[in-house]
Image: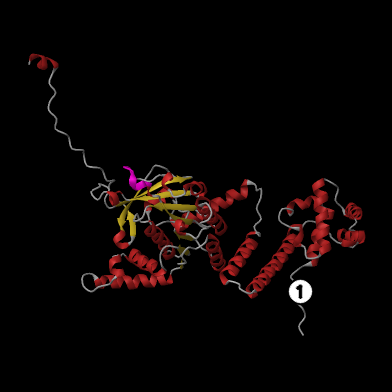
Amino acid sequence: MSAPLVPPHDVPAEQAVLGALMIAPDRLALIADWLREDDFYRKDHRVIYRGICEQSQRGDEVDAVTLGEWFDAQGIADLVGGVKYILELANTTPSAANIVAYAEIVREKAQLRRAIDVGTSLATAAFARGAGSEAVMAVASQELSLLQSSNARTGLQPTKPLIKRLVAEMTRRYAEQGGGLVGLPTPWRALNEHTKGLRDGCVYVVAARPSMGKTAFGLQLAGFTALRGARAAVFEVEMTGDECMARMLACHGEIPFSWVDFPVDGGDSELHWSRLYAMTGQLTNAPLLIDETPALKIEQLMARARREHLREPIRLIVIDHLHDMGVDRTKELRHELGNVVQGCKTLAKELRCPVVLLGQLNRNVAGRQDKRPTLTDLRESGEIEQKADAIYFLHREDYYDRDSHMAGTVELIPAKGRNLRLGETILLRNRFDQMRLEDWDDAYPQPPPAESKQRAPRRSRQAFLDN
Protein backbone atom coordinates (compact mmCIF):
# COMPACT_ATOMS: atom_id res chain seq x y z
CA MET A 1 0.00 0.00 0.00
CA SER A 2 1.45 3.38 -1.04
CA ALA A 3 1.94 6.10 1.54
CA PRO A 4 -0.58 8.99 1.45
CA LEU A 5 0.58 12.01 -0.54
CA VAL A 6 1.65 14.96 1.61
CA PRO A 7 0.91 18.44 0.22
CA PRO A 8 4.00 20.44 -0.81
CA HIS A 9 5.56 22.38 2.07
CA ASP A 10 8.91 23.37 3.56
CA VAL A 11 8.87 23.62 7.36
CA PRO A 12 12.53 24.80 7.71
CA ALA A 13 11.84 27.69 5.31
CA GLU A 14 8.76 28.69 7.32
CA GLN A 15 10.79 28.57 10.55
CA ALA A 16 13.55 30.65 8.96
CA VAL A 17 11.06 33.36 7.94
CA LEU A 18 9.49 33.59 11.40
CA GLY A 19 12.84 33.51 13.20
CA ALA A 20 14.22 36.24 10.94
CA LEU A 21 11.22 38.46 11.69
CA MET A 22 11.81 38.09 15.43
CA ILE A 23 15.48 39.09 15.24
CA ALA A 24 14.93 41.79 12.58
CA PRO A 25 11.27 42.95 12.61
CA ASP A 26 11.98 45.71 10.10
CA ARG A 27 12.44 43.01 7.42
CA LEU A 28 8.67 42.46 7.48
CA ALA A 29 8.38 45.37 5.05
CA LEU A 30 10.19 43.28 2.41
CA ILE A 31 7.56 40.53 2.35
CA ALA A 32 4.36 41.73 4.04
CA ASP A 33 2.57 42.80 0.84
CA TRP A 34 2.93 39.43 -0.90
CA LEU A 35 3.46 36.72 1.74
CA ARG A 36 0.07 35.81 3.21
CA GLU A 37 -0.82 34.11 6.46
CA ASP A 38 -2.31 31.13 4.65
CA ASP A 39 0.92 30.64 2.68
CA PHE A 40 2.28 28.86 5.77
CA TYR A 41 1.59 25.13 5.86
CA ARG A 42 1.66 24.64 9.62
CA LYS A 43 -1.21 26.16 11.60
CA ASP A 44 1.05 27.32 14.45
CA HIS A 45 3.26 29.13 11.93
CA ARG A 46 0.22 30.92 10.51
CA VAL A 47 -0.76 32.13 13.98
CA ILE A 48 2.79 33.31 14.75
CA TYR A 49 3.00 35.21 11.44
CA ARG A 50 -0.39 36.82 12.16
CA GLY A 51 0.82 37.92 15.59
CA ILE A 52 4.01 39.45 14.16
CA CYS A 53 2.01 41.37 11.55
CA GLU A 54 -0.57 42.65 14.06
CA GLN A 55 2.09 43.80 16.54
CA SER A 56 4.01 45.51 13.78
CA GLN A 57 0.89 47.32 12.54
CA ARG A 58 0.26 48.67 16.05
CA GLY A 59 3.86 49.84 16.32
CA ASP A 60 4.66 47.48 19.21
CA GLU A 61 8.10 45.99 19.78
CA VAL A 62 8.41 42.59 18.07
CA ASP A 63 10.74 39.94 19.50
CA ALA A 64 10.44 36.45 20.96
CA VAL A 65 9.65 37.72 24.49
CA THR A 66 7.00 40.33 23.59
CA LEU A 67 5.45 37.97 21.09
CA GLY A 68 5.18 35.21 23.73
CA GLU A 69 3.56 37.65 26.16
CA TRP A 70 1.11 38.74 23.46
CA PHE A 71 0.07 35.11 22.79
CA ASP A 72 -0.40 34.56 26.54
CA ALA A 73 -2.59 37.66 26.76
CA GLN A 74 -4.68 36.43 23.83
CA GLY A 75 -5.06 33.01 25.42
CA ILE A 76 -3.64 31.25 22.36
CA ALA A 77 -0.14 30.36 23.57
CA ASP A 78 -1.02 26.67 23.35
CA LEU A 79 -1.69 27.06 19.60
CA VAL A 80 1.93 28.01 18.95
CA GLY A 81 3.67 25.61 21.32
CA GLY A 82 4.14 28.19 24.05
CA VAL A 83 6.95 30.68 24.61
CA LYS A 84 9.50 27.87 24.42
CA TYR A 85 8.89 27.25 20.69
CA ILE A 86 8.90 30.98 19.89
CA LEU A 87 12.29 31.38 21.63
CA GLU A 88 13.56 28.33 19.78
CA LEU A 89 12.65 29.90 16.42
CA ALA A 90 14.50 33.10 17.27
CA ASN A 91 17.59 31.37 18.69
CA THR A 92 18.04 28.89 15.83
CA THR A 93 17.91 31.55 13.09
CA PRO A 94 21.44 32.87 12.54
CA SER A 95 20.56 35.82 10.29
CA ALA A 96 17.69 37.67 8.65
CA ALA A 97 19.71 38.36 5.50
CA ASN A 98 17.97 35.68 3.40
CA ILE A 99 14.40 36.30 4.54
CA VAL A 100 13.13 37.11 1.02
CA ALA A 101 14.58 33.89 -0.40
CA TYR A 102 13.00 31.83 2.39
CA ALA A 103 9.67 33.65 1.98
CA GLU A 104 9.70 32.90 -1.76
CA ILE A 105 10.08 29.18 -0.96
CA VAL A 106 7.12 29.35 1.42
CA ARG A 107 5.06 31.17 -1.22
CA GLU A 108 6.02 28.67 -3.95
CA LYS A 109 4.91 25.70 -1.87
CA ALA A 110 1.64 27.45 -1.05
CA GLN A 111 0.96 28.07 -4.74
CA LEU A 112 1.53 24.39 -5.48
CA ARG A 113 -1.00 23.47 -2.79
CA ARG A 114 -3.51 25.89 -4.31
CA ALA A 115 -2.96 24.33 -7.73
CA ILE A 116 -3.78 20.95 -6.19
CA ASP A 117 -6.95 22.46 -4.71
CA VAL A 118 -7.98 23.76 -8.15
CA GLY A 119 -7.45 20.30 -9.61
CA THR A 120 -9.45 18.68 -6.83
CA SER A 121 -12.35 21.11 -7.20
CA LEU A 122 -12.26 20.56 -10.97
CA ALA A 123 -12.57 16.80 -10.49
CA THR A 124 -15.40 17.23 -7.96
CA ALA A 125 -17.31 19.58 -10.26
CA ALA A 126 -16.83 17.26 -13.25
CA PHE A 127 -18.20 14.28 -11.28
CA ALA A 128 -21.29 16.23 -10.17
CA ARG A 129 -24.57 15.13 -11.72
CA GLY A 130 -25.66 17.38 -14.57
CA ALA A 131 -22.28 19.10 -14.83
CA GLY A 132 -21.61 20.94 -18.10
CA SER A 133 -18.09 20.64 -19.47
CA GLU A 134 -17.98 24.24 -20.70
CA ALA A 135 -19.01 25.64 -17.30
CA VAL A 136 -16.61 23.38 -15.40
CA MET A 137 -13.65 24.30 -17.61
CA ALA A 138 -14.54 27.99 -17.52
CA VAL A 139 -14.42 28.02 -13.70
CA ALA A 140 -11.18 26.01 -13.63
CA SER A 141 -9.57 28.28 -16.22
CA GLN A 142 -10.54 31.37 -14.24
CA GLU A 143 -9.17 29.92 -10.99
CA LEU A 144 -5.87 28.97 -12.65
CA SER A 145 -5.62 32.42 -14.20
CA LEU A 146 -6.21 34.08 -10.83
CA LEU A 147 -3.63 31.76 -9.29
CA GLN A 148 -1.13 32.72 -11.95
CA SER A 149 -1.78 36.45 -11.61
CA SER A 150 -1.46 36.23 -7.81
CA ASN A 151 2.21 35.38 -8.31
CA ALA A 152 2.85 38.90 -9.56
CA ARG A 153 4.55 41.10 -6.98
CA THR A 154 3.90 44.74 -7.71
CA GLY A 155 3.79 47.92 -5.68
CA LEU A 156 5.74 51.14 -5.24
CA GLN A 157 8.96 50.99 -7.20
CA PRO A 158 11.86 53.40 -7.75
CA THR A 159 12.13 54.84 -11.25
CA LYS A 160 15.51 53.24 -12.00
CA PRO A 161 14.27 49.69 -12.76
CA LEU A 162 11.26 51.07 -14.63
CA ILE A 163 13.47 53.21 -16.85
CA LYS A 164 15.86 50.32 -17.48
CA ARG A 165 12.96 48.03 -18.42
CA LEU A 166 11.41 50.63 -20.72
CA VAL A 167 14.67 51.33 -22.56
CA ALA A 168 15.36 47.60 -22.93
CA GLU A 169 11.87 47.06 -24.35
CA MET A 170 12.23 49.99 -26.75
CA THR A 171 15.56 48.61 -27.94
CA ARG A 172 14.06 45.17 -28.50
CA ARG A 173 11.11 46.53 -30.44
CA TYR A 174 13.32 48.73 -32.56
CA ALA A 175 15.56 45.79 -33.45
CA GLU A 176 12.62 43.51 -34.25
CA GLN A 177 10.42 45.92 -36.17
CA GLY A 178 12.82 48.35 -37.75
CA GLY A 179 11.94 51.24 -35.46
CA GLY A 180 8.90 53.48 -35.24
CA LEU A 181 6.50 51.06 -33.53
CA VAL A 182 5.92 50.40 -29.84
CA GLY A 183 3.14 47.85 -30.32
CA LEU A 184 1.87 45.12 -32.60
CA PRO A 185 2.12 46.06 -36.30
CA THR A 186 -0.97 46.18 -38.53
CA PRO A 187 -1.17 45.54 -42.29
CA TRP A 188 -1.58 49.26 -43.00
CA ARG A 189 1.35 51.65 -43.00
CA ALA A 190 -0.85 54.69 -42.34
CA LEU A 191 -2.43 53.07 -39.28
CA ASN A 192 0.99 52.05 -37.96
CA GLU A 193 2.17 55.65 -38.29
CA HIS A 194 -0.95 56.84 -36.50
CA THR A 195 -0.95 54.36 -33.59
CA LYS A 196 2.74 53.33 -33.42
CA GLY A 197 1.32 49.79 -33.29
CA LEU A 198 -1.48 48.20 -31.26
CA ARG A 199 -0.43 48.31 -27.63
CA ASP A 200 -0.53 45.50 -25.10
CA GLY A 201 -3.32 45.79 -22.55
CA CYS A 202 -5.47 48.06 -24.73
CA VAL A 203 -8.96 47.56 -26.17
CA TYR A 204 -9.53 49.00 -29.66
CA VAL A 205 -13.17 49.34 -30.72
CA VAL A 206 -13.64 49.50 -34.52
CA ALA A 207 -17.28 50.27 -35.36
CA ALA A 208 -19.22 50.79 -38.58
CA ARG A 209 -22.55 50.44 -40.31
CA PRO A 210 -23.06 47.21 -42.30
CA SER A 211 -21.02 46.83 -45.53
CA MET A 212 -18.32 49.26 -44.41
CA GLY A 213 -15.66 46.56 -44.04
CA LYS A 214 -15.31 45.94 -40.31
CA THR A 215 -15.15 42.13 -40.65
CA ALA A 216 -12.66 42.45 -43.51
CA PHE A 217 -10.61 44.76 -41.28
CA GLY A 218 -10.61 42.35 -38.33
CA LEU A 219 -9.86 39.19 -40.31
CA GLN A 220 -7.11 40.84 -42.34
CA LEU A 221 -5.49 42.08 -39.13
CA ALA A 222 -5.67 38.65 -37.47
CA GLY A 223 -4.34 36.84 -40.54
CA PHE A 224 -1.52 39.34 -40.99
CA THR A 225 -0.48 38.88 -37.35
CA ALA A 226 -0.54 35.07 -37.53
CA LEU A 227 1.33 34.95 -40.84
CA ARG A 228 4.11 36.92 -39.14
CA GLY A 229 4.36 34.15 -36.52
CA ALA A 230 2.46 35.84 -33.66
CA ARG A 231 -0.43 33.85 -32.19
CA ALA A 232 -3.82 35.41 -32.97
CA ALA A 233 -7.30 34.38 -31.77
CA VAL A 234 -10.49 35.31 -33.63
CA PHE A 235 -13.85 35.00 -31.88
CA GLU A 236 -16.21 35.08 -34.87
CA VAL A 237 -19.65 35.40 -33.29
CA GLU A 238 -21.32 36.47 -36.54
CA MET A 239 -20.01 34.08 -39.24
CA THR A 240 -18.96 30.45 -39.51
CA GLY A 241 -15.35 29.30 -39.44
CA ASP A 242 -15.63 28.25 -43.10
CA GLU A 243 -16.69 31.77 -44.11
CA CYS A 244 -13.75 33.20 -42.15
CA MET A 245 -11.24 30.96 -43.89
CA ALA A 246 -12.70 31.70 -47.34
CA ARG A 247 -12.32 35.43 -46.68
CA MET A 248 -8.79 35.02 -45.35
CA LEU A 249 -7.72 32.96 -48.38
CA ALA A 250 -9.09 35.65 -50.70
CA CYS A 251 -7.54 38.45 -48.65
CA HIS A 252 -4.03 37.14 -48.13
CA GLY A 253 -3.85 35.21 -51.41
CA GLU A 254 -5.09 38.31 -53.29
CA ILE A 255 -7.74 36.22 -55.04
CA PRO A 256 -11.23 37.46 -56.02
CA PHE A 257 -13.62 36.36 -53.29
CA SER A 258 -16.28 35.57 -55.88
CA TRP A 259 -13.93 32.93 -57.33
CA VAL A 260 -13.07 31.51 -53.88
CA ASP A 261 -16.78 31.29 -53.14
CA PHE A 262 -17.52 29.61 -56.49
CA PRO A 263 -14.40 28.52 -58.45
CA VAL A 264 -14.86 28.27 -62.21
CA ASP A 265 -12.60 27.40 -65.13
CA GLY A 266 -11.33 29.94 -67.58
CA GLY A 267 -9.82 33.38 -67.23
CA ASP A 268 -7.25 33.52 -64.44
CA SER A 269 -8.39 30.26 -62.89
CA GLU A 270 -4.92 28.71 -63.05
CA LEU A 271 -3.37 31.71 -61.31
CA HIS A 272 -6.10 31.67 -58.66
CA TRP A 273 -5.55 27.95 -57.93
CA SER A 274 -1.81 28.53 -57.61
CA ARG A 275 -2.29 31.36 -55.13
CA LEU A 276 -4.97 29.43 -53.26
CA TYR A 277 -2.73 26.40 -52.69
CA ALA A 278 0.20 28.58 -51.63
CA MET A 279 -1.89 30.53 -49.12
CA THR A 280 -3.61 27.37 -47.85
CA GLY A 281 -0.20 26.03 -46.84
CA GLN A 282 0.78 29.28 -45.12
CA LEU A 283 -2.47 29.65 -43.17
CA THR A 284 -2.43 25.97 -42.19
CA ASN A 285 0.93 26.48 -40.47
CA ALA A 286 0.13 29.92 -39.05
CA PRO A 287 -0.62 30.21 -35.29
CA LEU A 288 -4.21 31.29 -35.95
CA LEU A 289 -7.18 30.23 -33.78
CA ILE A 290 -10.86 30.68 -34.72
CA ASP A 291 -13.88 30.24 -32.44
CA GLU A 292 -17.21 30.27 -34.31
CA THR A 293 -19.56 29.91 -31.31
CA PRO A 294 -22.68 32.08 -31.84
CA ALA A 295 -23.96 34.35 -29.04
CA LEU A 296 -20.79 33.70 -27.05
CA LYS A 297 -20.88 35.10 -23.51
CA ILE A 298 -17.96 37.23 -22.35
CA GLU A 299 -17.28 34.80 -19.47
CA GLN A 300 -16.93 31.94 -21.96
CA LEU A 301 -14.72 34.00 -24.24
CA MET A 302 -12.42 34.97 -21.38
CA ALA A 303 -12.16 31.37 -20.16
CA ARG A 304 -11.28 30.08 -23.63
CA ALA A 305 -8.71 32.81 -24.22
CA ARG A 306 -7.10 32.19 -20.84
CA ARG A 307 -6.98 28.46 -21.47
CA GLU A 308 -5.24 28.93 -24.82
CA HIS A 309 -2.90 31.52 -23.37
CA LEU A 310 -1.76 29.04 -20.72
CA ARG A 311 -0.79 26.63 -23.52
CA GLU A 312 1.04 29.30 -25.50
CA PRO A 313 0.85 33.12 -25.27
CA ILE A 314 -1.71 34.90 -27.46
CA ARG A 315 -0.51 38.16 -29.06
CA LEU A 316 -3.80 39.44 -30.51
CA ILE A 317 -7.52 38.89 -29.94
CA VAL A 318 -10.15 39.97 -32.51
CA ILE A 319 -13.87 39.79 -31.65
CA ASP A 320 -16.56 40.07 -34.36
CA HIS A 321 -18.63 41.56 -33.03
CA LEU A 322 -19.68 43.25 -29.79
CA HIS A 323 -23.39 43.59 -30.56
CA ASP A 324 -23.77 39.87 -31.38
CA MET A 325 -22.25 38.72 -28.08
CA GLY A 326 -24.46 36.74 -25.73
CA VAL A 327 -25.85 39.12 -23.08
CA ASP A 328 -28.78 39.05 -20.67
CA ARG A 329 -31.51 40.79 -22.68
CA THR A 330 -33.65 41.20 -19.55
CA LYS A 331 -31.12 43.71 -18.23
CA GLU A 332 -30.22 47.15 -19.52
CA LEU A 333 -28.30 46.59 -22.77
CA ARG A 334 -26.02 49.56 -22.15
CA HIS A 335 -24.66 47.99 -18.96
CA GLU A 336 -24.46 44.51 -20.49
CA LEU A 337 -22.36 45.74 -23.42
CA GLY A 338 -20.27 47.77 -21.01
CA ASN A 339 -19.56 44.55 -19.10
CA VAL A 340 -18.39 42.94 -22.35
CA VAL A 341 -15.96 45.79 -22.99
CA GLN A 342 -14.78 45.64 -19.36
CA GLY A 343 -14.18 41.90 -19.76
CA CYS A 344 -12.14 42.59 -22.89
CA LYS A 345 -10.11 45.17 -20.96
CA THR A 346 -9.45 42.70 -18.14
CA LEU A 347 -8.36 40.11 -20.70
CA ALA A 348 -6.10 42.56 -22.54
CA LYS A 349 -4.28 43.51 -19.32
CA GLU A 350 -4.11 39.96 -18.00
CA LEU A 351 -2.81 38.42 -21.24
CA ARG A 352 -0.75 41.53 -22.11
CA CYS A 353 -2.02 41.74 -25.67
CA PRO A 354 -4.25 44.10 -27.68
CA VAL A 355 -7.94 43.24 -28.08
CA VAL A 356 -9.73 44.52 -31.21
CA LEU A 357 -13.49 44.62 -30.67
CA LEU A 358 -15.65 45.21 -33.74
CA GLY A 359 -19.04 46.87 -33.27
CA GLN A 360 -22.14 48.28 -34.93
CA LEU A 361 -23.28 51.86 -35.38
CA ASN A 362 -26.94 52.82 -35.05
CA ARG A 363 -29.19 53.79 -37.96
CA ASN A 364 -29.07 57.53 -37.27
CA VAL A 365 -26.10 57.85 -39.63
CA ALA A 366 -28.15 56.99 -42.72
CA GLY A 367 -30.68 59.74 -42.02
CA ARG A 368 -28.18 62.61 -41.89
CA GLN A 369 -26.75 64.67 -44.72
CA ASP A 370 -23.23 64.25 -43.33
CA LYS A 371 -22.97 60.51 -42.83
CA ARG A 372 -19.52 60.43 -41.29
CA PRO A 373 -20.04 58.75 -37.88
CA THR A 374 -19.43 60.28 -34.47
CA LEU A 375 -19.29 58.79 -30.97
CA THR A 376 -23.02 59.32 -30.46
CA ASP A 377 -23.66 56.92 -33.37
CA LEU A 378 -22.09 53.99 -31.48
CA ARG A 379 -24.95 51.73 -30.37
CA GLU A 380 -25.44 51.90 -26.58
CA SER A 381 -22.32 54.03 -26.61
CA GLY A 382 -22.06 55.36 -23.03
CA GLU A 383 -20.09 52.65 -21.27
CA ILE A 384 -18.37 51.47 -24.47
CA GLU A 385 -16.94 54.94 -24.97
CA GLN A 386 -15.87 55.12 -21.33
CA LYS A 387 -14.12 51.73 -21.12
CA ALA A 388 -12.47 51.40 -24.55
CA ASP A 389 -8.91 52.70 -24.87
CA ALA A 390 -9.39 53.74 -28.49
CA ILE A 391 -12.37 53.97 -30.86
CA TYR A 392 -12.22 54.06 -34.66
CA PHE A 393 -14.99 54.28 -37.24
CA LEU A 394 -14.99 52.85 -40.76
CA HIS A 395 -16.83 54.93 -43.36
CA ARG A 396 -17.46 54.57 -47.11
CA GLU A 397 -18.86 57.68 -48.71
CA ASP A 398 -19.49 55.85 -52.00
CA TYR A 399 -21.85 53.46 -50.22
CA TYR A 400 -24.33 56.35 -50.01
CA ASP A 401 -23.25 58.21 -53.17
CA ARG A 402 -21.75 56.14 -55.97
CA ASP A 403 -20.66 59.26 -57.81
CA SER A 404 -18.76 60.60 -54.80
CA HIS A 405 -15.21 61.82 -55.34
CA MET A 406 -14.30 59.44 -52.46
CA ALA A 407 -15.26 56.38 -54.54
CA GLY A 408 -13.00 53.40 -53.85
CA THR A 409 -11.87 54.66 -50.44
CA VAL A 410 -12.56 53.57 -46.88
CA GLU A 411 -12.04 56.19 -44.19
CA LEU A 412 -10.72 55.03 -40.83
CA ILE A 413 -11.76 57.80 -38.45
CA PRO A 414 -10.17 58.03 -34.97
CA ALA A 415 -12.81 59.13 -32.46
CA LYS A 416 -11.14 58.48 -29.10
CA GLY A 417 -7.74 57.49 -27.81
CA ARG A 418 -4.73 58.56 -25.83
CA ASN A 419 -1.64 59.30 -27.93
CA LEU A 420 -3.81 59.44 -31.08
CA ARG A 421 -4.14 62.40 -33.41
CA LEU A 422 -7.92 62.85 -33.38
CA GLY A 423 -9.40 64.51 -36.44
CA GLU A 424 -6.76 63.00 -38.73
CA THR A 425 -8.55 60.53 -41.01
CA ILE A 426 -6.66 57.48 -42.29
CA LEU A 427 -7.49 56.71 -45.91
CA LEU A 428 -7.52 53.10 -47.12
CA ARG A 429 -8.27 51.59 -50.52
CA ASN A 430 -11.38 49.45 -50.87
CA ARG A 431 -10.42 46.01 -52.23
CA PHE A 432 -13.52 44.23 -51.02
CA ASP A 433 -13.43 42.17 -54.21
CA GLN A 434 -10.59 40.37 -52.36
CA MET A 435 -11.96 41.02 -48.86
CA ARG A 436 -9.04 43.29 -48.03
CA LEU A 437 -8.07 46.89 -47.41
CA GLU A 438 -4.90 48.47 -48.74
CA ASP A 439 -2.96 51.65 -48.05
CA TRP A 440 -4.10 54.59 -50.16
CA ASP A 441 -0.93 55.79 -51.86
CA ASP A 442 -2.51 58.31 -54.24
CA ALA A 443 -3.21 61.96 -53.56
CA TYR A 444 -6.13 62.67 -51.26
CA PRO A 445 -9.30 62.82 -53.41
CA GLN A 446 -10.63 66.33 -53.96
CA PRO A 447 -14.23 67.22 -54.78
CA PRO A 448 -14.81 68.58 -58.30
CA PRO A 449 -15.03 72.37 -58.55
CA ALA A 450 -18.55 73.66 -58.14
CA GLU A 451 -20.15 74.70 -61.40
CA SER A 452 -20.45 78.46 -61.65
CA LYS A 453 -24.00 79.60 -62.06
CA GLN A 454 -24.65 81.95 -65.00
CA ARG A 455 -26.40 85.02 -63.71
CA ALA A 456 -27.52 88.15 -65.56
CA PRO A 457 -25.34 91.22 -64.84
CA ARG A 458 -26.80 93.57 -62.27
CA ARG A 459 -28.14 96.87 -63.62
CA SER A 460 -26.94 100.06 -61.98
CA ARG A 461 -29.39 102.29 -60.10
CA GLN A 462 -28.88 105.09 -62.65
CA ALA A 463 -29.71 102.83 -65.59
CA PHE A 464 -32.90 101.83 -63.79
CA LEU A 465 -33.87 105.47 -63.29
CA ASP A 466 -33.08 106.32 -66.91
CA ASN A 467 -35.63 103.77 -68.06
Quadrant for residue 464, please give it. Answer: top left
Q: Say whether residue 55 is left or right of residue 158.
A: right
Quadrant for residue 36, please give it. Answer: bottom right
Q: Residue furthest left?
A: 467
Where does the image place residue 75, in percent across and percent down from the top left? 90, 56
Kind of residue indicated by mark 1: Val
Residue visible at 38% across and 68% down?
A: 245
Q: Is residue 98 visible?
A: no
Q: Is residue 235 above or below residue 338?
A: below
Please state, as top left, top right, bottom left or bottom right, where the N terminus lies in the image: bottom right
- Span highlighted in magenta in the image: 364-371
Rendered image coloring scheme: secondary structure
Question: How many other residues sit within 10 Å of disc 1, few (<14), some (14-19) or many (≥20)?
Answer: few
Q: Nearer the viewer, residue 238 or 101?
A: 238
Q: Nearer the viewer, residue 324 or 395?
A: 324
Residue visible at 82% across and 46% down?
A: 58
Where does the image place residue 252, in percent across and percent down from the top left? 35, 64
Q: Nearer the viewer, residue 79 or 148?
A: 79
Residue that badge 1 annotates = 6
Q: Residue furthest bottom?
A: 1
Q: Is residue 238 above or below residue 424?
A: below
Where does the image place residue 297, in percent across and percent down from the top left? 52, 61
Q: Say whether residue 426 is left or right of residue 31.
A: left
Q: Is residue 198 magenta?
A: no
Q: Is residue 430 visible?
A: yes
Where does the image place residue 136, in percent across and percent down from the top left? 60, 69
Please state, as top left, top right, bottom left or bottom right, where the C terminus lies in the image: top left
